[in-house]
Image (cartoon, rainbow, N blue to C red):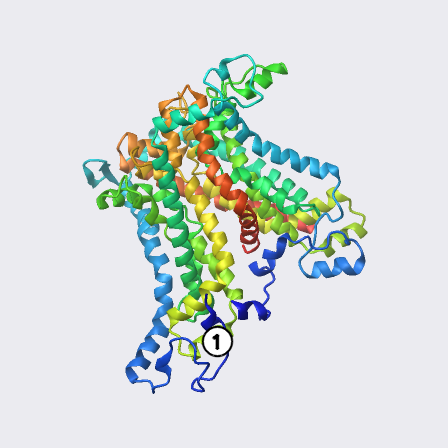
């Protein structure tokens, strides 16, 4: 489709290339106007090309993010619109609500329950995929299937599996002599169920990311380790893991950003979408939604958004430092 | 394209996409082990961690992982194909029942299912095409054109990937309300027209996919900048563009939070319609899970045809970090 330009041989300016394409203007001596247009073209086109991203980001990304801070310091109403400046009042009100602290606890709990097993399981699956498998593509595609299922569907399915009365999980538990668990009534079980949904969807995806990183580990390192008498497990701990360090940091940081904003799965865990009778699994984003769109208080909703943003930044930093320290000490050993 | 394919690329990056695309070839696994062969493979970044042929345990574990991943989907179909009393019976079904189409009809009656499917197709396709086009445009500029401020601007683009823009929902909603777009598809489409990830992805790819001489040649021949982009960059971007399209498509198809906030019940996307289904029929799990199955099948079909690209796309994206 692009034959003329792609095949254009390296010709000098005026030697007259192959007479193809509609570039007839070349024959005539360039007018100064044409030359000026061409200079402008060269100088400003790059900015034109990158501008869609920057304009769109400014309007739908940066502006809302910055403006959130403005909204958070004002009295707002869904119908009345902006009220007066009230400083930290929204923040104080939110921080004074029990629901905020419950949602903070839930968010952190679900985040830890999902991200930690997720990273471990993904690395182990990646290790299996890293063997010289027959029909590689089949196995890789197989582990990725859950990724294309919309989280809302995932939540509906698992909500059924974890049903308190007629759920499959409780039936299996009862068959082997364990009491039914109140997945929709107790706090920790509900967090476990929601974390399971998150893990279901993301383990395969992360496994492929780790697989890519594992394949980049130089084979010589394994050979050297083997000569030194290291077994498989030892090689995995002392060679594979330290070499995965940047990827582990990357996966943890992306899952922090996504995990702390979790909304879809807990929202759909029961039909009311309020996070349980007593907010057992109401997350911060759900709380934000409730403040803004159920209670019509955009100011308080924005205050939660600002607090959530600070939390994400803080945990991102902590993650980064811890991961760095752990893996660098492993390298030294 | 022909010129591009025939001559070897001048720069072969260590971790660039072009090398990684060939990841799925069977890379001589049979003759592995012997000294010279494995050393050559190591040099080509073909290193295999655990090495050697896997035993049945490895295959068994992987099969278990995949079956575990499929089970919830199978369960969804299983319950969705029975009537609503199935869950309260003593034993669980093992085989699908004959009620799926009746349930599907009820789903279509309860929520605007076709409209939601149509909306999801529109949103995912439009954002997919747009992200590919604008990202290629910006990626080409960052990768191949020289202009003042290119480096800091690219750093800025990458930095925005770490910013959770979802937290700006309150003002964004106000913007949409002011424009009168709430309940309209453009409220979902416009914010997704171009992404930082897409720009970064294309920059990385085009940097090594287009030889500089090609652009110089086009320039010397008097090609305008946009012609050069159209005839050199766009064709060269095809493989990366296909993956970026798939990513964007899946992302928008599965997205819930923002469409849920900004679209009303009249004009939902599929996930929003599913949410309505549950709110309307909380007891009738057969109906709800039939709906979940119906919303999943289209993307599963796409995945069967394009999953290979998606897999290699994810793996490439990872290596470049």
Q: What percent of the width, then of the height, locates residue A51?
A: 35, 61
Q: Mark 1 highlights which residue?
A: A8
For the residue carrying disc 1, how many other residues have a C-alpha within 10 Å: few (<14), some (14-19), or many (20+)? Answer: some
Considering only vertical position in the picture, is B236 above or below B56?
below
Asked whether the viewer can see residue A161, the reply is yes
Q: What percent of the width, then of the height, locates residue B162?
A: 44, 50
Res. B229 image quadrant: bottom left
Label 1 secondary element: loop
Relative horizontal placement of residue B263, taking residue B206 as reference (left or right): left
The C terminus of chain B sits in image quarter? bottom right
Q: Chain of mark 1?
A: A
Q: At 45% across and 63% down in the image, what residue appears? A: B234
Asked whether the viewer can see residue A318, the reply is no
Which of B304 and A261 lies nearest the eye of the viewer? Answer: B304
Which of B121 and A48 lies nearest the eye of the viewer? Answer: B121
Number of numbered discs on residues: 1
Q: What percent of the width, then of the height, locates residue B243?
A: 50, 52
Considering only vertical position in the picture, is B182 above or below A278?
below
Relative horizontal placement of residue A103, taking residue B72 as reference (left or right): left
Q: What percent of the width, then of the height, locates residue A254?
A: 49, 45
């Amino acid at each position: 489709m692009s034959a003329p330009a792609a095949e254009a041989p390296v010709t000098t300016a005026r030697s007259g290339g192959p007479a193809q394409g509609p570039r007839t203007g070349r024959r005539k001596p360039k007018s100064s106007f044409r030359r000026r247009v061409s200079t402008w073209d060269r100088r400003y086109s790059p900015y034109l090309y990158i501008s869609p991203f920057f304009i769109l980001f400014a309007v739908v990304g940066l502006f809302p993010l910055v403006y959130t801070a403005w909204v958070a310091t004002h009295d707002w109403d869904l119908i009345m619109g902006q009220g007066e400046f009230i400083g930290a009042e929204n923040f104080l009100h939110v921080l004074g609500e029990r629901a905020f602290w419950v949602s903070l606890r839930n968010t952190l709990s679900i985040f830890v329950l999902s991200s930690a097993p997720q990273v471990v399981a993904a690395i182990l699956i990646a290790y299996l995929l890293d063997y010289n498998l027959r029909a590689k593509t089949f196995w890789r595609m197989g582990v990725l299937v859950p990724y294309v299922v919309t989280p809302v569907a995932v939540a509906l399915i698992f909500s059924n599996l974890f049903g308190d009365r007629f759920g499959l999980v409780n039936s299996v538990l009862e068959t082997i002599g364990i009491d039914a668990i109140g997945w929709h009534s107790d706090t920790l079980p509900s967090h476990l169920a929601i974390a399971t949904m998150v893990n279901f969807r993301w383990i395969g995806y992360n496994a492929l990311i780790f697989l890519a990183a594992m394949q980049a580990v130089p084979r010589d390192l394994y050979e050297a380790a083997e000569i030194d008498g290291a077994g498989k497990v030892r090689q995995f701990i002392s060679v594979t893991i330290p070499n995965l360090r940047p990827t582990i940091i990357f996966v943890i940081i992306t899952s922090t950003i996504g995990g702390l904003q979790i909304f879809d799965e807990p929202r759909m865990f029961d039909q009311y979408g309020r996070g349980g009778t007593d907010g057992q699994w109401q997350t911060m984003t759900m709380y934000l939604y409730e403040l803004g769109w159920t209670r019509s208080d955009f100011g308080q909703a924005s205050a939660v958004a600002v607090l959530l943003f600070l939390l994400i930044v803080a945990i991102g930093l902590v993650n980064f430092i811890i991961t760095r320290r752990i893996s660098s000490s492993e390298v030294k050993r | 394209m022909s010129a591009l394919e025939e001559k070897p690329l001048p720069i072969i990056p260590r971790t660039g996409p072009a090398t990684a695309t060939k990841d799925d070839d069977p890379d001589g696994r049979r003759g592995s082990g012997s000294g010279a062969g494995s050393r050559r493979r190591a040099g080509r970044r073909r290193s295999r961690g655990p090495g050697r042929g896997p035993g049945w345990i490895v295959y068994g574990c992987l099969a278990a992982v995949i079956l575990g991943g499929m089970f919830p989907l199978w369960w969804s179909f299983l319950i969705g194909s029975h009537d609503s009393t199935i869950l309260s019976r003593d034993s669980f079904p093992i085989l699908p029942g004959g009620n799926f189409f009746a349930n599907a009809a009820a789903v279509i009656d309860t929520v605007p299912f076709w409209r939601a499917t149509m909306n999801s197709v529109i949103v995912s396709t439009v954002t997919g095409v747009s992200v590919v086009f604008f990202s290629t445009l910006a990626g080409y500029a960052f990768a191949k054109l020289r202009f003042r401020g290119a480096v800091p601007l690219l750093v800025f683009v990458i930095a925005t990937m770490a910013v959770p823009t979802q937290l700006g929902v309150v003002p964004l909603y106000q913007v949409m309300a002011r424009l009168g777009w709430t309940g309209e598809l453009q409220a979902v489409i416009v914010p997704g027209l171009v992404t930082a990830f897409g720009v970064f992805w294309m920059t990385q790819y085009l940097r090594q996919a287009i030889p500089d001489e090609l652009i110089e040649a086009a320039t010397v021949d008097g090609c305008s900048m946009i012609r050069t982009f159209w005839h050199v960059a766009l064709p060269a971007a095809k493989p990366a563009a296909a993956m970026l399209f798939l990513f964007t498509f899946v992302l928008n198809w599965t997205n819930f939070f923002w469409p849920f906030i900004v679209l009303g019940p009249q004009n939902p996307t599929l996930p929003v319609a599913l949410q309505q289904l549950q709110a309307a029929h909380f007891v009738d799990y057969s109906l709800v899970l039939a709906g979940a199955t119906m919303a999943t099948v289209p993307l599963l079909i796409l995945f069967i045809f394009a999953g290979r690209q998606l897999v290699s796309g994810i793996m490439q994206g990872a290596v470049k970090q």
